[in-house]
Image: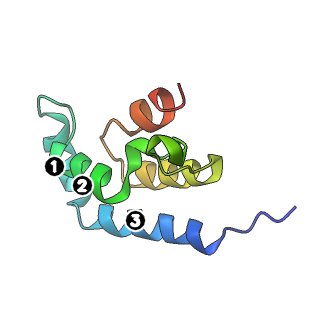
Amino acid sequence: MDAALTAEQHAIRRTLRDLLARSGGPEAIPAAVRTAEGHDPNLWRRLAEELGLPGLALPEEYGGAGCGATESALVCEEAGRALLPTPLLATSGLAAPL
C-alpha cells in the first residue's frame, strides 16, 4: 500500500496553509469567535468560494469537490494547525455526507 500523498493532495494542503497564514494568524482568533457568527464570516466566505470547503466531501455531480477521506483529513489537519474557528466540521464533515 502506497501511503504517499499525490501532487493534488500536496496542493490542497499548501493552498489552504498559505491562505490561512495570510488570514491573520492566531491573533485574529479571539475577535473572530466574539462575532455573532462565532467565526470570521469573511474568511469563511473566502474558504467556501475560493476553495469550495463546504462541498469538499460532496460528489462532483452534486456540485461538490468529490474529495475522499485523505483530502478531508488534510483540510482538517490544516484547519486545526491554524486553530481555524469556522463551521468547517459542521458543513463538510457532518452535513455534506448526509
Q: Using the image as rendered, state which of residue 87 and residue 28 is in the foreground.
A: 87
Q: Which mark is residue 46?
A: 2
Instruction: Give the residue type that dot 1 points to.
Output: Asn
Left or right of 87? Residue 65 is: right
Front residue of this view, candidates 83 and 6:
6
- The spot of residue 73 in percent (x, y) is 57, 49
Dot 2 alpha-carbon crowd within 10 angstroms: few under 14, some 14 to 19, many 20 or more: few
Residue appearing at x 57%, y 70% in the figure: 8
Q: Earlier in the sequence, mark 3 or mark 2?
A: 3
Q: Position of residue 33 (x, y in %)?
A: 20, 36
Residue at mark 1: 42
Rounded to the nearest angstrom, the CA distance separating label 1 from label 2 is: 6 Å
C-alpha separation, residue under disc 3 versus residue under disc 2: 13 Å
* Residue 97, quarter of picture: top right
Circle 3 sits in a helix, a strand or a loop, which is it? helix
Alpha carbons under labels 1 and 3: distance apart: 17 Å
Callout 3 amino acid: Arg
Lower sequence index among marks 1 and 3: 3
Q: Residue at x 18, y 52 (%)?
A: 28
Identify residue type, mark 2. Arg
The furthest residue to the front: 61
- Residue with the mark numbered 3: 17
Q: Residue at x 49, y 64 (%)?
A: 13
Q: Secondary structure at mark 2?
A: helix
Where is residue 1 drawn, in percent x and y? 88, 61
Residue 15: x and y in percent read: 41, 68
Q: How is the image coloured?
A: rainbow
Q: Say whether residue 84 is left or right of residue 9.
A: left
Query: Nearer the observer, disc 3 or disc 2?
Result: 2
Marks 1 and 2: CB-CB under 8 Å?
yes
